[in-house]
Image (cartoon, grey):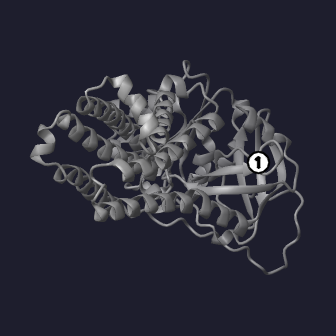
Amino acid sequence: MTFEPATRPARSSGRRAPEPRPAPAPRPRLLDAALVVVGLGFGATVGSAIIVETASQLQAPGGVAMFLGNLTGMAGTYLALVMVLLVSRIPHIERILGQDGLLRWHRRLSPWPISLIVAHAILLTYAYAEASHSGLLAQLASFVSSYSGMLIAIVGLGLMVLAAVLSIYSVRRRLRRETWWAIHLGMYLALALAFSHELALGPSFVGHPVTQVLWSVAWAATAGVVLAYRFGLPAYRTLRYRLKVVEVRRETEDVVSLILEGRDLDRLAVSGGQFFEWRFLTPKLWWQAHPYSLSARPKPPYLRLTVKAVGDHSSALAELAPGTRVAIEGPYGAFTTHARRRQKAAIICGGIGITAARALLEDLPKKSDPAVLWRVSTEEHAALAGEVEELVRRRRGTLHVVAGNREEVSLHRVARLVPDLRQRDVFVCGPEGFVEATRQVLAGEGVPPEAVHYEVYAL
């Protein structure tokens, strides 16, 4: 079974293609250590806001509001830095939680820093108004005109609130991916704008050089992590592996496979089921990075991804010319065999979710008896069906291809098709609605949550 391009240089006889490196196994203890460090940092942040207050300051006009404003500002900013770290793609953490897990944590945490920072702004405006015996609007005008860095801080707050509003699911799902990405760059800008304001005016910083140094180190470390893993590492891998398109192969009416060639791909540590952020360097596409799973394990010097045309970007990939250069970010995702805790596995996928499942199958042991349930609109839309069938057969498993739309295909058939479902690890991939519905069915069938591993194809 091969996905090499139809036209390729002949290899020297007797030379065996190098095997790709497996991705490193997750190390859960690193996550435990990271949580301890984050917790200690939060405690130190709150403590630094408390110990600077005195009884006389609290008893002064607006004193209590001033204290609460400083406390909420410090706590909110610290949590905002944690939010940034959650999506900075730290490899050791990403391998444990996967992008889906990191985004879930990010979404659960996000209301807290925004709410605390908004409370900080309101409380301090009220406190200063009380101290100066002026109204709130007059005090706000005084902030803008008389306080160094305050106007920049207000702009930063506005950017944070905008990002929060556009993160509401009903709003977010209407946004293009590029718009979403640009908006979240604004969060980085907002935090940067707030930095000088805090050092110049924050009660925990004015006259406290040790706190200033520690806070500056925390900000610099966060910025360094973002620059290293969101920009530096992708640039290094792009330059090292030098990927380019060598063939665009049509699989079905609306699905194509892109076969890429690069150098040193045996050194690219990746597991079946993982994905990359791909940036195709053409005049129309270079500025967009989109996530697509590998549809097979690497076969140096080649990689393959298989894409269904569901939007402007994915549709444009069918028109790529051979020789197009490709920039990459990744690999990402915890949807790998490293997540297995049981001897047998079941794989449930919807539509083009078969790409990650097909690559995952390659990493399952021989005779592992995988049970694969694949929902497709019609059998004609079952891209890579022959490859999937062969991989399942080699592992002594079973493949169930169920055709029909979501309303016609009852996920409760899973229990009948896979009677020993509760004794298996279950891997689920596909569109967001499909994955969520499948998880609910699995919970109803008694499959424990720790045995369910999933990858969502969504924004």
Amino acid at circle 1: Trp
In this rendering, would 40 be left or right of 6?
left
Residue occupying the point 82% across, 48% down: 282
Q: Secondary structure at mark 1?
A: loop
74 or 375: nearer the eye?
A: 74
Q: Which residue is mark 1?
A: 286
Q: Is residue 428 visible?
A: yes
Residue 245: x percent and y percent? 81, 55
Specify the quadrant that holds the C terminus.
Answer: top right
Most extreme residue toward the bottom is 14
Q: Is residue 423 visible?
A: no
Most extreme residue toward the top is 407
Q: Tally the marks.
A: 1
Residue 408: x percent and y percent? 56, 19
Residue occupying the point 41% across, 41% down: 147
In this rendering, would 217 be left or right of 229?
left
In this rendering, would 313 be left or right of 146?
right
216 in relation to 86, above or below: below
Specify the quadrant that holds the N terminus.
Answer: bottom right
94 in relation to 8, above or below: above
Residue 435: x percent and y percent? 49, 34
190 or 265: nearer the eye?
A: 190
133 or 98: nearer the eye?
A: 133
In this rendering, would 21 be left or right of 193?
right
Residue 114: x percent and y percent? 38, 36
Residue occupying the point 38% across, 51% down: 200
